[in-house]
Image (spheres, grey):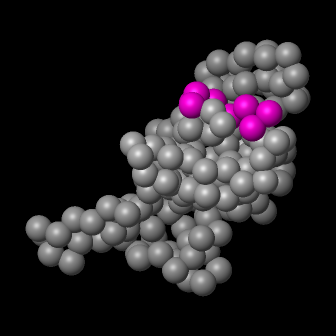
């Protein structure tokens, strides 16, 4: 049991199931891996570890997945499908899920973005990078040192669980958040 807003290795190692509560409300009961990789909402995602939160508008959705317009130039493919086109969605991407890809592979890889390295920190067993991709920022963790000022990064569609969703209102007065 932990009351701290950090995810302890001991909690993970000793637990078959994890229950996350906030303000006397149960938010998620699941395996430690599912709580970490597929948090039920933004609070759970932040409680169990560092995240990049990316928000966008659903521009395409079917049973296989969806595409989010992040800003004027970037689209993020996610595996969650059957979303309402026009809805605003926020996904949580863990820093270790953001990886570098060679430029020559970029055209074949969805969710590949050119990023500027704003800051780099060596943390013993890995590096942490603060990256800027045009209008949004990403944190990336990697065991490999990045030596250039710009990198091409990739976010796997499977590493983008939805943690917030605002449905498209049917009238000007109706706004629903899930």
- Magenta-drawn stretch contains 122: no
User: Is residue 20 positioned above or below 169 on the image?
Assistant: above
The answer to whether 173 is drawn above or below residue 127 in the figure is: below
Locate the C terminus and report the quarter of the image it occupies: bottom left
On the rendered structure, is 60 left or right of 176?
right
Residue at 30% x, 71% y is 168
Residue 74, position as x, y percentages in the image: 53, 53
Can the viewer see residue 156? no
Q: Is residue 52 above or below residue 80?
A: above
Q: Is residue 135 found left or right of 131 in the rendered image?
A: left
- Residue 170 occupies quadrant: bottom left
Is 174 on the left-hand or right-hand side of 86?
A: left
Nearest the camera: 27 or 63?
A: 27
Position of residue 78 measured from the top left corner of the image (x, y, whole percent):
62, 65
Magenta stretch in the rendered image: 3-11
Q: Main secondary structure of the magenta part?
A: loop
| Residue in the foreground of this view, choosing between 156 and 133 | 156
Q: Give the residue at x 65% y 80%.
A: 64
| In-front residue for pair 121/161 | 161
Q: Is residue 5 magenta?
A: yes
The percent position of residue 52, horizontal first and vertical second, equals 57, 40
Q: Residue at x 27, y 66 (%)?
A: 176
Q: Which one is in front, 131 or 90? A: 90
- Residue 167 visible at all: yes
Residue at image location 15% in from the left, 75% down from the top:
171
Q: Position of residue 90 (x, y in %)?
A: 47, 54
Q: Quadrant of the N terminus?
A: top right
Q: Splitting the image into 4 quarters, where does residue 107 fall?
A: bottom right
């Amino acid at each position: 049991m932990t009351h701290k807003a950090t995810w302890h290795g001991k909690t993970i190692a000793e637990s078959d199931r994890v229950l996350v509560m906030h303000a006397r409300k149960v938010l998620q009961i699941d395996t430690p891996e599912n709580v970490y990789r597929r948090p039920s909402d933004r609070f759970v995602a932040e409680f169990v570890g560092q995240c990049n939160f990316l928000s966008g508008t659903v521009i395409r959705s079917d049973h296989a997945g969806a595409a989010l317009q992040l800003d004027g130039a970037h689209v993020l493919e996610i595996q969650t499908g059957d979303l309402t086109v026009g809805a605003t969605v926020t996904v949580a991407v863990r820093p270790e899920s953001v990886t570098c890809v060679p430029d020559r592979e970029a055209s074949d890889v969805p969710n590949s973005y050119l990023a500027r390295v704003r800051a780099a920190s060596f943390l013993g067993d890995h590096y942490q990078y603060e990256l800027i991709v045009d209008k949004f920022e990403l944190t990336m963790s990697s065991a490999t040192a990045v030596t250039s000022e710009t990198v091409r990064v990739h976010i796997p569609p499977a590493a983008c669980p939805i943690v917030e969703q605002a449905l498209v209102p049917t009238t000007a007065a109706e706004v629903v958040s899930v």
